[in-house]
Every structure is written in structure tokens, then in C-alpha cells.
Amino acid sequence: MSPPRLRFAPSPTGFFHVGSGRTALWNWLIARQQGGQFVLRIEDTDLERNREEWVDGIRVAMRWLGLDWDEEYRQSQRAALYGDAMLRLHADGHAYYCDCTRADVDGRNVAALGPGAENRGYDRHCRVRGLTPGAGRPLRFATPRDGITIVHDIIRGEPSFDHGEIEDFVIARGDGSAMFILANVVDDVDMGITHVVRGEEHLSNTPKGILLWQALAPDVALPVWAHVPVLVNAQRKKLSKRRDKVALEDYRAMGILPDAMRNYLVLLGWSPGGDREILTVDEMTELFRLEAVVTSPAFFDMVKLAHMNGEYLRALSIEEFVEVATPYLPAGASAQVDVFPKMAPFVQERLRLLTDLPNQVDFLYNDPYAWEDAIASCKAPVEMLDGVLAALAALPGATGTEVVPQAGTGTVHSPTVVVGPALNIATESATTGWSAAEIRVAVETVGAANGLKLAKAQGAVRVAITGRTIGPPLFEAMEVLGRAECERRLRLARARLGTA
């Protein structure tokens, strides 16, 4: 048996749809699995809607997913083939020219069948008139009057279509340009396509394609058909660019890794069995089977995609994580390139989307400006900040900090601080008494003295240091920031609390 030839045939009329990504992936897997060829065919005959940047977008998206192709074609460069097919179909009696308008057809249908028959479809009026080609005259395929066409589909079984329900459909426009259905079949025959794997929305056109194929190339075997399930949103409605996030470019921009997207797409309607979800490309290639694809719609679950992306982020080495994450760092990060790598291991464990990164690390590069209400909502904020400042000053290596007594409040650190967006951050050696472990003990001890467990005790400290109530591990963050910067932020936050 000859190696299979599969094709992915997108139209460059918009951004690259995630459903197109899945279709391309499944075609690519079958081709690579069976030692065949994978053909990229740009169906760019719709001159009013096509744009060259979207052609480039198709190629970029496929390369991002890791999908290479063996051959590439553009339908806009193959008009001569379609013209030859039109001539042959007309000469062999499989097609005829028509000069009927929509009003003509509706009028005849109403006259013959009564009111309400306006949308009954074409009545084959011109089938025996013997019209020649002319301006404004489309070419129609002469659908057999009797019989049925069966589509042998790996996924759908064997749906049948009664020829009496298929009108004499247009295969060439009045300007002589080929319709999608004709160009599609001519290309598949010419390119030796053996498998047509595409979306289920094309199933209703497949009997027309089969009839055209049999008229044009009766001695060439029909391809294997497989119409894959539609993708739906949480409301189980078909994904729509008007309502849903469907462009692959959008997911790339939000920090979905290509390996994670590829892994997620392969599972939309197919499963390798068991509880396995994380698959390498080699495992996908070995295990994927069209026969195991389900017919029911596949739910595109952003929550699950984000979870899978988190798994892939955590599987990266620290060096790889820093490389993919750096473009998502907040403003100001470029001036301190050595800071993020120190914090990266702690952020990596918690991140799902790279676009969430700024919220995790912006405090490293900019003053947090802790808000009074956030501080006030914490347990014993005054006592905790005063106590932690004193405890940190007592750690080995401290140079001492000036304190200014205030009547009725005990001692607080001076509120006179310098605030600026460019922070001089330097991790200090644990031998100087400034390590995450020692900072944790200091905060825990102060918390215990105020009747607080660590989870509550660190609340005010976290807001003071990061400006947020949640975030990466606090004590590791403080180690990265350094003693002087942490003390400055704690004094600033304490000053905002005013007198107790």
C-alpha cells in the first residue's frame, strides 16, 4: 500500500482558529505515523476576503505548533486546472449553464407548489436548454435524479444522502471562477489525496464532492473520509469568533506554550485511554487513531488548558522558564536583568499563564505602595510591622536602624523614606543573617507573641513588601529583595498606619 497523502486546506480569511489547529494536527499525526506526506493547501480563491498577512499567519501558527509540511500549494495559482475540469464536465454532460435569476426560480416554485415554496431550491429549469457559456451564467452540476450516495466515514459511519434532496449545485460562478466544491475536488484528485480529515460542517457537502469526483476521475479511488467533531464553549455552543476567544494568536499572546496547546488540541475529541493526558509528540504520533475519535462536540475548556499549560511550565528547567517568561515581565524589569532569575523558581511553581507573571513579580521592580485598607484588613498590622522591623534588625549582619519615638505608640521606625521606581536589589548571603529561613523564624516568632499563627502573622508583612494579599512565597521574595529594601518598605507601610 502506498503511503498516505493528507492535506490541510485553510482559507486565509481571518486569524488562525483553534479548530483549524486541531484539524491540522490530526492530519499531520496520521501522515507522520504512516510515513506519508502532509500537504498545506491555501484555499485563497475568495479575492474579496483573502489577505496576504493571513496567509503568513497560517504558516506562523503551524510552525508554532510544531507542524511542518512536505508540499505547499495555493488555489489562486491553479485556475487553469479548474477551467479544464469545467470544460470536461460540460462536454461530458455532467454540467450545464444556467441563466436563471433567484426571482425566476422562486416564481416557478410558487406557481408549481403554491405559496411558501420560495426557498425550495433550484428546479433544474436549464438542464435541457443547452445554453452555452456566457457572462453571468454559472455552471451547474447535473446531479443524478435517482439513487443515493453513501459517505464511508471513519468517525461518522456510513451516512447516506438521497440524490433527490441534492439540487443541481453551482460549480462555477457567472464570471467563470471555480466554486469551493469544484476546486476542492480537482485539487484532491490532482494531488493524490488519500485521506480527507476535516470539520463536521463539511459533511453535508461530501456527497456533492463524491459525485464530482466520480464524474471527473471515475478510475481514481475515493479518499478516506473523517469528519471531526465541532468545538463548543461552556454553554455548548459552537465556538464563534464573535463570542469566544478562538484565534490561536490570542492564546499564544497570553502565554500558552506551543507544547501545551498541541497536547491540549490532540485531546479534543480523542483520548489515548486511561487517565493519561500529558503526551509527547512521539506518543501522540504512535497512539493517535481516527477510529477512536468521538462524534460528540468537544468542549474547549480554558480552565483545563491553563492547568495543562501550568504543567508544561513546571516541567521546564529554570533556564528555559526564565527565557519564555522574560518577555512577559513588567515595565522596569529590563533595567535589572539579574533579579527575576532569583525569584523564578518560586513563581514557576504557581504560574499557569505567562500573562499572570506581572502580578506575581511586579513588586520586585516597582514600589508596591501598600494601600491602607489592605494593611488594615490584616491581623494586628501595627504590632506585626513594629515587631518584624525590630526582629529583622536583630538578625546577624544588621547595621542598625534609627528609630523615632512617638508618644503613645511605642517605638516606630522613621516614616521619612525615599521612594523610587528603580530599586537596588541584591540578594544577601545567608551567612549575614538574611535568608528565607531566618526571616520566616523572625516573622513566626513575632506572630506567636501576638497570638497569631504564621498564615495570619505574615499578612501585614506581605502587603507591605509586595502590595498584595496573595503572591509568591513571602520569605523567599524578601530574601531576593534584600534587607535594606525590605526594611524600607516595612517602614513605609508602618508610617501609613499612623498612630495606633
Image (spheres, helix red, strand yellow):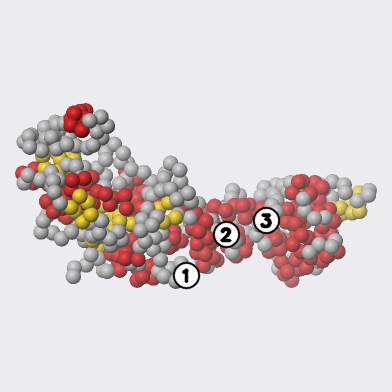
The image quadrant that residue 437 belongs to is bottom right
Q: Amino acid at mark 2?
A: Leu
Q: Is residue 21 left or right of residue 343?
A: left
Disc 2 to disc 1, C-alpha distance: 23 Å
Q: Earlier in the sequence, mark 2 or mark 1?
A: 1
Q: Residue at x 29, y 36 (%)?
A: 48
Q: Earlier in the sequence, mark 3 or mark 1?
A: 1
Q: Is residue 422 visible?
A: no
Q: Residue at x 51, y 67 (%)?
A: 315
Q: Position of residue 206 (x, y in %)?
A: 23, 51
**Circle 3 Cα neighbour tier, 10 Å, few/some/many (<14 / 14–19 / ≥20):** few
Q: Position of residue 371 (x, y in %)?
A: 74, 46
Q: Is residue 305 visible?
A: yes
Disc 2 to disc 3, C-alpha distance: 13 Å
Q: Amino acid at mark 3?
A: Ile
**Which residue is disc 1 drawn over?**
275
Considering the numbered disc 3 on the image, is that residue within a helix, a strand or a loop? Answer: loop
Q: Nearer the viewer, mark 2 or mark 1?
A: 1
User: Please, which residue is most extreme toward the right here?
Assistant: 407
Q: Position of residue 445 (x, y in %)?
A: 82, 66
**Which residue is disc 2 drawn over?**
351
